[in-house]
Image (cartoon, helix red, strand yellow):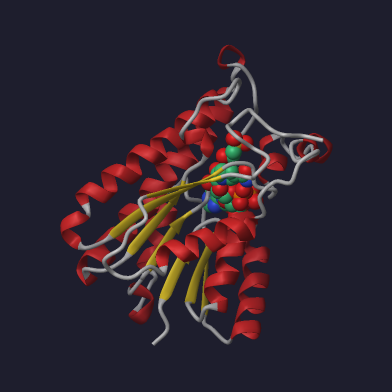
Amino acid sequence: MNKIALITGATSGIGKACAELYAKNQYNIIITGRREERLSQLKAELESTYSVEVLSLCFDVRSNDEVVKAFESLTGKWKSIDVLVNNAGLAKGLSSIQNGDLDHWEQMIDTNVKGLLYVSKAIMPLMIELKHGHIVNVGSIAGKEVYPNGNVYCATKHAVDALTKAMRIDLLPHKIKVSAVCPGAVDTEFSEVRFDGDKEKAEKVYLGYEPLKAEDIADAIYFMTSRPAHVNINDLLIMPTAQASATQFDKN
Ligand code: NDP
Ligand code: 8X3
């Protein structure tokens, strides 16, 4: 029987690359995101390319009601989730804390912290019942270091780091693995979202060096979840070779 991977934020970037890689490895996939059309398109692509089953759930992780409703709809085999990749997340803005935008702060906290909690709260009981499962939280270098003007985004990713450790401790007796993957710069839609659709500004983030690709992170996540039962990779910090820390780049 195929295993099942649930990937939040699969409409783009790291989540989409994960959905593709798990499907390629014959997992049945649950993909989530807010953009229905992208979800339908990805579902059709994965089903036809890899002959796996794909369930698409369109909801906003910031709404616990939507999260609960989406996962209450799971029936039969779809409740036996082997892997949960808590990937949905975003940065909004890049400004000093004193000039911060309250709406940006709320979007980041509600998505990266509360959204991750809501999804986990819905899925953990299923894994506990099975005494089996692996949760991979997508953290960031921003959860290891704080960089100028990164303030609230960095705080949300530090929270992901703390929650990963907390989940690993509390879920230990239930035989559920919990890991974090923490990337440096990955060329996705991340910067376009951060700069409210300003493509020119977003492109500059990845100029003059070779950033990571979404597929690099998907590879790492798949590797983590395909270790033998007695092995857990707690935390993986993965950077472009040209990036030594949150702020130090070797640019041309
Ligand atoms: P993208 O913007 O390409 O993808 C983000 C995904 O998150 C999209 O599928 C989006 O789907 C989903 N998402 C965002 N907000 C919500 C929401 N409220 N409800 C449901 N889904 C949501 O960026 P990345 O792939 O780069 O980002 C994925 C994760 O990786 C994030 O947690 C990010 O913080 C983290 N990260 C990224 C790095 C980078 O440099 N790119 C580095 C380190 C970590 P939709 O819009 O359809 O809802
Ligand atoms: C994304 C990486 O450092 O650009 O989490 O904010 S960073």
The answer to whether residue 88 is above or below residue 151 is: below
Which image quadrant is residue 242 in?
A: top right
Q: Is residue 138 visible?
A: yes
Q: Is residue 123 above or below residue 50?
A: above
Residue at horizontal 48 percent and vertical 60 percent from the top: 221
Is residue 220 rendered to the left or right of residue 186? left
Q: Nearer the viewer, residue 66 or 1?
A: 1
Quadrant in the picture for the N terminus: bottom left
**Left or right placement of residue 106 versus residue 186 in this view:** left
Residue nearest the observer in this picture, 74 or 219? 219
Q: Position of residue 172 (x, y in %)?
A: 20, 55
Residue lying farthest left?
173
Q: Is residue 129 above or below residue 198?
A: below
Q: Quadrant of residue 165?
A: top left
- The C terminus appears in which quarter of the rendering? top right
Q: How many marks?
A: 0
User: Residue 186: image x %, image y %?
Assistant: 65, 47
**Compared to 16, does 210 lie above or below?**
above
Q: Is residue 35 visible?
A: no
Identity of the residue drawn at 27% across and 50% down: 168
- Expressed as whole percent of the image width and height from the top left, the position of residue 173 reads 15, 58
Where residue 109 appears, x then y in whole percent? 47, 34
Q: Nearer the viewer, residue 243 or 25?
A: 243
- In the figure, is residue 124 to the left or right of 15? left
Q: Residue at x 61, y 58 (%)?
A: 216
At a point 59% along the width and 41% down the height, the residue shown is 184
